[in-house]
């Protein structure tokens, strides 16, 4: 009968195990950065959808105001027509504008419904209402390397460690093993000196002398892939810098647009009030009145759109500086 126990340890493996561990850690980091990148990208999409819905809702509100005004004007002109003080073409123009406005309202309603469905999907739950919200104005935000770049860097490191792992095959491997055996016999031999136990200590050295260059070609292939990734990293870094500059430019441009839209709204509202009074007095025709009403409606929607675009511009800046957007929402 026999029984034995063996214990062994690699004293040196050319760095294969350490390179494998480092490679797997790099791949794990790449996965974490990819997940974070996706989450931040999703945050930006949610912000864009949210404020696009708000802009569409502002346009819808302006069109509904226009609908009320057109309805009231149509009823007023109808009364004048009934007593012969207005022509049929005035009523037809108002009806045409009223119908076109209803058509536009239905379009905006569908747009809002579509955006809400997409937002439900991205948020992962059904949204009942959208409260007012603002994004903090960026102040002294420190630029951080984007998660997309970190993914590329981690992948490049993984390739480098993989190349090291392959290269380790050319280094000697040193292993020590100890085997202890016990023996039992049914009967003792008078001739042979039977062993009761045995301990064997073995030191093994393994060295690859020649492999037709197979491993070196594999290593070369990995290093070429790493160099290609390094080029991607450099391009991604330049792209991040450009996107930050464009985000800042977008903020300044949008602020200027807000000032222009506000001035346009004030002028359009003032002009509409004046023209509406003249129209009621018969000093201008309904074409002029409808133009003034449309200009005021568009100016109101444009002003709200500019305000919401500024919020999106803030979110874009936080995104491109690799910040967590939700931390800046109030």
Image (cartoon, grey):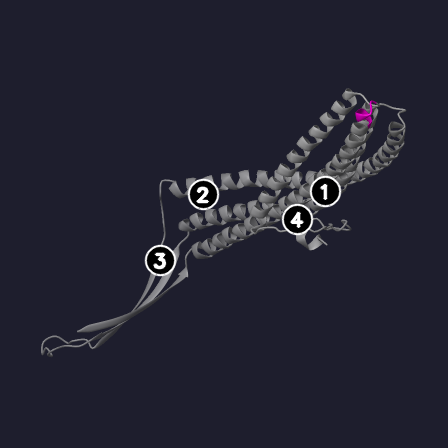
Q: Residues within 10 Å of mark 2 (few under 14, many from 20)?
A: some
* Tag 4–tag 3 contact (CB < 8 Å): no
Q: CA distance from mark 3 to mark 2?
A: 24 Å
Residue bearing the label numbered 3: 205
- Residue found at the very far front of the displayed protein: 83
Secondary structure under the numbered disc 4 in the rendered image: loop
Quadrant of residue 59 in the image? top right
- Any mark on residue 229, and which? none
Magenta-highlighted stretch: main secondary structure?
A: helix
Residue bearing the label numbered 2: 219
**Residue 51 % position (x, y):** 69, 44
**Residue 322 % position (x, y):** 66, 48
Please tell me which of labels 3 and 1 falls first in the chain: 3
Q: CA distance from mark 3 to mark 1?
A: 64 Å
Please tell me which of labels 3 and 2 falls first in the chain: 3
Magenta-span inclusion, residue 68: no
Near-viewer residue (145 or 228): 145
Frontmost of labels 4 and 3 is 4
Magenta-span inclusion, residue 81: yes
Secondary structure under the numbered disc 2 in the rendered image: helix
For the point 62% across and 44% down, the residue is: 45
Quadrant for the N terminus in the image: bottom left
Quadrant of residue 14 in the image? bottom left
Q: Residues within 10 Å of mark 4 (few under 14, many from 20)?
A: many
Residue 329 vertical placement versus 197 (above, below)? above
Residue bearing the label numbered 4: 322
Frontmost of labels 3 and 1 is 1
């Amino acid at each position: 009968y026999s029984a034995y126990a063996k214990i062994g340890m690699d004293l040196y493996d050319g760095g294969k195990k350490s390179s494998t561990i480092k490679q797997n850690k790099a791949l794990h980091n790449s996965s974490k950065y990819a997940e974070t990148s996706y989450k931040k990208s999703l945050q930006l999409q949610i912000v864009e959808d949210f404020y696009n819905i708000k802009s569409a809702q502002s346009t819808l509100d302006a069109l509904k105001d226009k609908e009320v005004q057109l309805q009231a004007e149509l009823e007023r002109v109808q009364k004048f027509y009934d007593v012969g003080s207005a022509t049929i073409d005035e009523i037809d123009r108002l009806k045409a504008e009223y119908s076109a406005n209803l058509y536009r309202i239905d379009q905006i309603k569908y747009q809002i419904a579509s955006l809400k469905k997409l937002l439900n999907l991205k948020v992962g739950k059904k949204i009942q209402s959208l409260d007012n919200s603002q994004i903090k104005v960026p102040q002294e935000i420190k630029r951080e390397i984007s998660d997309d770049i970190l993914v590329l860097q981690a992948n490049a490191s993984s390739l480098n460690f993989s190349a090291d792992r392959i290269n380790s095959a050319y280094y000697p491997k040193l292993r020590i093993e100890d085997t202890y055996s016990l023996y039992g016999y049914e009967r003792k031999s008078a001739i042979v000196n039977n062993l009761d136990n045995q301990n064997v200590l073995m030191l093994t050295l393994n060295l690859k002398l020649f492999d037709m260059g197979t491993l070196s070609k594999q290593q070369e292939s990995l290093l070429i892939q790493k160099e290609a990734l390094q080029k991607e990293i450099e391009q991604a870094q330049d792209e991040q810098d450009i996107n930050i500059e464009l985000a800042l430019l977008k903020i300044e441009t949008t602020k200027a647009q807000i000032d222009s839209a506000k001035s346009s709204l004030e002028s359009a509202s003032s002009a509409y009030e004046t023209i509406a009074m003249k129209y009621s007095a018969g000093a201008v025709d309904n074409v002029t009145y409808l133009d003034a009403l449309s200009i005021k409606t568009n100016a109101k929607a444009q002003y709200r759109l500019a305000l919401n675009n500024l919020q999106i511009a803030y979110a874009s800046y936080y995104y491109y500086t690799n910040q967590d957007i939700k931390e800046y929402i109030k």
